[in-house]
Image (tube, grey):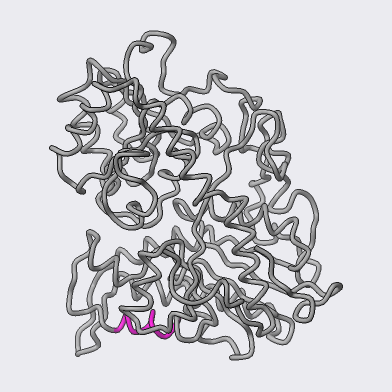
């Protein structure tokens, strides 16, 4: 979808833009594809600032969950993270003059409190994968009387923003219904991925045939952003971008895909990917596997915080720190079934990645996952934190193994139609180009959430 930006941006003056992107969990994948598509979009003179250490320190400080008293109605856990990131992003913003900025994009709203400090003439877009109203309502967090001020702060962020971009209908509806933001200010642009090809993926940076991505820093070399700074200006010096795939771009390269060395060829190959072992239900999956299916299925857990003892259990393999290209081209395609019994989630990339790789998915009916999976066609939806439905669907998969390839093909078709990075990220940049310099989102893109 193309946007007429001629009058707004001009042919020789790309929009001078700052992109702040949180770096925890699936946000890394969002950063990957955002960088890749910005690299080739001449409409933007972009400086990307990944919020590496801020995520780690902010999460630590947020654990100091001591509610303040005196009627201030603060949930200290979230409120402190909002305030901490406001100071840090604000510090980085002070490096730039407002008159030099045509666009500020911040992902997510937890890092976006600093938009309240921007001059009103600077266009600001906030990208979200959930709202904190949803998080407190549906997640592990306690719905305490101290939430009001936190949610009011979030509402002010949305009001100040020129546009809120949501990964899902689920989160977009909350912005409109729970925070009273006009639907015209909310746009759904789904997150997505593109499966790297063994012979070289589009974009080159992430898979160039030898699996190392050929990337340098954030921008494949020295493309400069505002004031001559490279996109890598705020990256740790040790990250050089060339470690994304060490498997020579081939399937079955010995890096491990949960299949073993031939001993498990007769077993159903089940995979799980995700950090947050308990939140994402890996503990439940592991228990169900051991109690019901250990002699019929091999389970691979790609998880950085799984108990080390898991690797010693029968027909269980534990992996961590797998480069993304290797994960997509070698690990995921080795699974017959992907199981993701998460207790609470938003718009998890792991589900989209499995579907893109042609693997059917069993996942919890939480967050935006029901928008991803067509129940009974591309996989199965189950109630969160319940053992019986998980046992039932995994049992069905074992008893109907011949049907899984067709189900996986439908999953890939669904992913390619709704969650393809090569479609969704250009659409995102079209939307951002419309907002830059005070422009408007075209009528064909604005309005109520996409259904």
Q: Position of residue 323 (x, y in %)?
A: 55, 36
Q: Is residue 63 magenta?
A: no
Q: State the quadrant of the C terminus.
A: bottom left
- The residue located at (49%, 51%) in the rendering is 418
Find residue 104 and report its image quarter. Answer: bottom right
Considering depth in this image, is 418 or 428 the residue closer to the camera? 418
Q: Position of residue 169 (x, y in %)?
A: 39, 65
**Above or below: residue 15 compared with residue 199:** below
Quarter location, residue 268: top left
Which residues make up the magenta segment? Answer: 149-157
User: Which one is nearer the viewer's eye here, 359 or 44?
Assistant: 359
Is residue 347 positioned above or below 333 on the image? below
Residue drawn 22% across the image and 20% down it? 294
In reply to whether residue 152 is colored magenta, the answer given is yes
On screen, residue 293 versus residue 90, left or right, reads left
Q: Nearer the viewer, residue 449 or 31?
A: 449
Question: On the rendered structure, is 418 left or right of 43?
Answer: left
**Residue 329 horizontal side relative to residue 363, left or right:** right
Residue at 61 percent of width and 26 percent of height: 247
Left or right, residue 11 beside residue 111: right
The x and y percentages for residue 312 are 28, 21
């Amino acid at each position: 979808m193309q946007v007429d930006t001629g009058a707004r941006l001009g042919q020789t003056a790309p929009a001078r833009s700052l992109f702040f992107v949180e770096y925890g969990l699936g946000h890394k994948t969002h950063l990957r594809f955002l960088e890749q598509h910005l690299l080739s979009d001449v409409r933007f003179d972009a400086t990307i600032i990944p919020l590496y250490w801020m995520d780690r320190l902010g999460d630590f400080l947020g654990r100091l969950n001591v509610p303040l008293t005196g009627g201030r109605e603060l949930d200290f856990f979230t409120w402190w993270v909002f305030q901490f990131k406001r100071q840090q992003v604000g510090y980085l913003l002070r490096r730039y003059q407002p008159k030099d900025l045509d666009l500020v994009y911040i992902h997510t709203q937890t890092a976006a409190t600093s938009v309240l400090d921007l001059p009103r003439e600077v266009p600001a877009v906030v990208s979200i994968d959930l709202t904190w109203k949803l998080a407190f309502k549906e997640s592990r967090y306690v719905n305490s009387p101290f939430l009001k001020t936190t949610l009011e702060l979030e509402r002010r962020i949305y009001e100040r923003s020129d546009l809120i971009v949501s990964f899902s209908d689920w989160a977009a509806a909350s912005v409109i219904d729970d925070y009273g933001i006009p639907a015209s200010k909310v746009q759904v642009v789904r997150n997505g991925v593109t499966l790297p090809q063994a012979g070289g993926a589009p974009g080159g940076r992430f898979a160039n045939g030898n699996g190392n991505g050929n990337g340098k820093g954030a921008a494949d070399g020295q493309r400069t952003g505002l004031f001559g700074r490279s996109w890598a200006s705020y990256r740790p010096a040790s990250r050089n971008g060339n470690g994304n795939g060490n498997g020579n771009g081939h399937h079955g390269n010995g890096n491990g895909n949960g299949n073993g060395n031939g001993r498990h060829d007769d077993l159903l190959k089940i995979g799980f990917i995700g950090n947050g072992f308990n939140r994402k239900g890996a503990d439940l999956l592991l228990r169900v596997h051991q109690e019901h299916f250990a002699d019929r299925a091999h389970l691979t857990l790609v998880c950085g915080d799984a108990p080390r003892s898991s690797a010693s259990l029968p027909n269980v393999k534990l992996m961590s720190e797998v480069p993304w290209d290797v994960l997509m081209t070698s690990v995921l395609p080795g699974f017959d079934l992907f199981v993701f019994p998460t207790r609470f989630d938003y718009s998890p990339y792991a589900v989209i990645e499995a579907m893109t790789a042609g693997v059917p998915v069993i996942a919890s009916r939480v967050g935006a996952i029901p928008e991803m999976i067509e129940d009974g066609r591309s996989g199965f939806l189950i109630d969160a934190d319940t053992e019986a439905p998980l046992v039932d669907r995994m049992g069905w998969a074992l008893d109907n193994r011949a049907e899984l390839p067709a189900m996986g093909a439908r999953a890939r078709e669904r992913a390619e139609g709704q969650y393809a990075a090569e479609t969704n990220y250009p659409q995102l940049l079209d939307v951002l180009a419309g907002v830059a310099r005070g422009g408007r989102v075209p009528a064909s893109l604005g309005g109520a959430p996409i259904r």
